[in-house]
Image: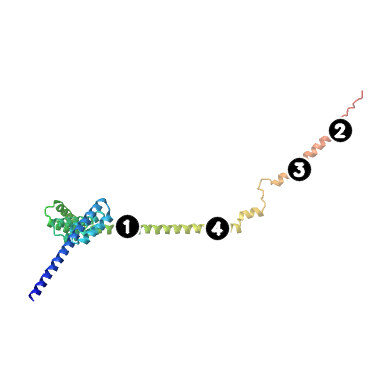
Amino acid sequence: MKKIYNLSIFCLIFFSIHFISAQTENSEKAEKLYKKFSAQASEEREKGNFVQAEALYRKALDKKPEGDAAAYNFGNLYFENEKKQQSVLRYAESAKSSEDKMVKHKNYHNLGNVFMEEKQYAKAVEAYKNALRNNPNDEETRYNLALAKQKREKEKNDGGGGDQNKDQQQKKENQNKDQNKGGEGDQEKKEDKKQDSKDGKNEKESEKKKEDAKQNPKEGDNQKQKQPSQPQKGKMSEQQIKNLLQAIQNKEKDTQEKMNAKKVKGVKVKTEKDW
């Protein structure tokens, strides 16, 4: 029994050592791959290849999820490409998983910068405070904290709404402008409709007058057509003038015939000779 007991202990120790050795080997292999993918991701990031860098950072963190350096640089990649929400997530993960105060400081500092750009000044203040807790000597973080506090106080004095209040005020002004434009448009439509109605009425009246003129000619025109013009008092009519001229011509004709008859009787006829 004693020999069997000793043999069991030996086997247990052997398998434990083998397991630990295999685990260590896998851990070392994962660490190597983590460093390899992280380095490659940094190279692609410097070249501006966002897609390739993003994929390599994911591979690195897959090999070492607690890899705070890769998570921090991953956050920088998102921040540089205007993907603020993703950068916040990566910075927070890196700050939480890291045991290095300098790494924590960098993550919180960058978180504060993201919140400042997003005008979330209260969150920025807390992020900068956490950064200074891990590195009290960083003057840039201290300056940013003072600026964030100033912005936060100004936001409170403005009514607590900050840019949100400005957006609501601008929206309200735009709505008032739209309503005024709508009112002016309705007024113009009413005026146009009124003018069209007036023009239509005038046109109908004009058409009616033309129709009445066709059916009922003016009395003056009817009188001109039915009654001949009468001579005015003290003046001869056209027919009377014609008759008078005709009488004068007849009288002159008679007088001329009488004179011609007298001339014929008084004229002597001269006889020409034949030589």
Q: Is residue 21 something that shows in the picture?
A: yes
Contact, mark 2 vs mark 3 (Cβ under 8 Å)? no
Residue placed under numbered mark 2 in the picture: 265
Circle 4 or circle 1, nearest the eye? 1
Q: Secondary structure at mark 2?
A: helix
The amino acid type, in three-letter code, at marker 4 is: Glu
- Identity of the residue drawn at 62% across and 54% down: 221
Q: If you read the primary sequence from the N terminus, does the residue marked by circle 3 or circle 1 appear first?
A: 1
CA gap, disc 4 and disc 3 = 56 Å
Left or right, residue 252 beside residue 127: right
Q: Nearer the viewer, residue 119 or 28?
A: 28
Structural crowding at the residue carrying mark 2, measured as other residues with C-alpha within 10 Å and reported as few (<14), some (14–19) or many (≥20): few
Q: If you read the primary sequence from the N terminus, does the residue marked by circle 4 or circle 1 appear first?
A: 1
Q: Quadrant of the N terminus?
A: bottom left
The amino acid type, in three-letter code, at marker 3 is: Ala
Q: Nearer the viewer, residue 43 or 204?
A: 43
